[in-house]
Image (cartoon, helix red, strand yellow):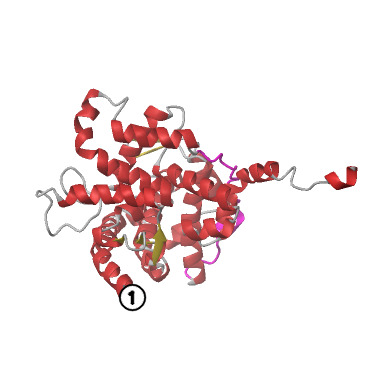
Amino acid sequence: MCYNVYMARISKNNSDFYQDRNLKNLDRIDRLLEELPPFCEDFVRGIETRTSPLTRLNYVYDLRIFFDYLSRKKFRQKPMTELTLEDLEAVTDTDLELYLSYLSNYRFAGKRLSCDERAKARKLSAVRSMFKYFFNKGLIESNQTTKVATPKLHEKEIIRLEGSEVSSLLDTAEHGDGLSDHAFGYHEKTKVRDCAILTLFLGTGIRISELVGLNNESIDFSNNSFVVTRKGGNHAILYFSEEVGDALAAYLAQKESDPRIPPSEHALFLSLQYKRISVRAVENLVKKYAKIVTPLKKITPHKLRSTYGTALYRETGDIYIVADVLGHRDVNTTRKHYAAITEDHRRSVADAVKLHHPEDES
């Protein structure tokens, strides 16, 4: 099939899912903005052309916590909806540092919460973006966020599965050993699907959002490839092995023989309600099998992606290929995540250079 025709077909079939997801996020943004200072709407609208709805939604969530803090701690219970740009301009760098400290142990919406260094950095980034926007527009005279240091981020150890654990995870999904009686009752209905999902994660490094967004038409068995919608909405073709292809083919064959699946449902992976499977459901099924195989490791879909990235880097030694396959825009992101395993390469080449050759010793 012509590449452009193939991509056009996939784009059309995927558009409904991503359009619906974006519309839901936009609805959430609108509802949350009603709780925030009126000028927040100007900020969200101002960054619309360079951010996705999901990014803006996360900004709004973070700003809601920031303005709740200001309302209660700095402006003496002044309602968030009554805060003005003059109030924003009155915020000092000390206020911002106190806010970061507050995030270590705070209460919001009736819950006691705590942010680690990465969560603090993300929340500070949202506040910085807002201050920068209004400063560049000339609506505030100073940008106090430039005086506040980003929390130091310590490198996190990459949690991934080893080779034997990968095999055990797939065997557990296939046979159901170790599942509770309740979970085992559903296993016969879901095992083929679950094996296909886990195999796709471990064999391609696909993101969970990309996996959930796949449609039946996304898969091209003639080329052992499929199309994903990357961050930012761009499409990319990824390729899979025969092992992954077999798992996908088994699942599609099962679907074709199930008359209960609505003809109008194009989603590749379905829930027991015959609707597109949710991100939460995929996270739960990964956790369900992983805690049996490796209870001391907190394995998530992203950790399966890391497992694939690590294996690919070990096999190829090419960080650029790993970055391209995983869809990293910046190879430094890939290098940061997989730098730890370069120790394996250093060890493997320790004896590669010979100082004395046999003929020299004769």
User: In the image, what residue type sits under mark 1?
Assistant: Cys
Is 167 in front, or is 35? 167
Q: Residue, x 39% and y 67% (percent of image)?
A: 234
Q: Residue, x 35% and y 33% (percent of image)?
A: 171
Magenta span includes 156: yes
The residue tagged with tag 1: helix, strand or loop?
Answer: loop
Q: Quadrant of residue 48?
A: bottom left
- Relative side of 192 to 95, left or right: left
Is 117 in front, or is 225? 225
**In the depicted structure, whether residue 263 falls above or below residue 73:** below
Magenta span includes 63: no
Q: Residues within 10 Å of mark 1 (few under 14, many from 20)?
A: few
Q: Which residues are magenta?
A: 139-159
Check the picture and name the quadrant holding the C terminus. Answer: top right
Check the picture and name the quadrant holding the N terminus. Answer: bottom left
- Relative side of 85 to 194, left or right: right
How many numbered discs sit on the rendered protein? Answer: 1
Q: Residue, x 40% and y 69% (percent of image)?
A: 46
Provide residue 145's location: percent of width, then percent of height: 55, 56
Is 179 in front, or is 82? 179
Q: Is residue 210 visible?
A: yes
Q: Is residue 109 visible?
A: no
| Farthest-out residue, left | 259
Give the labeled residue for mark 1.
2
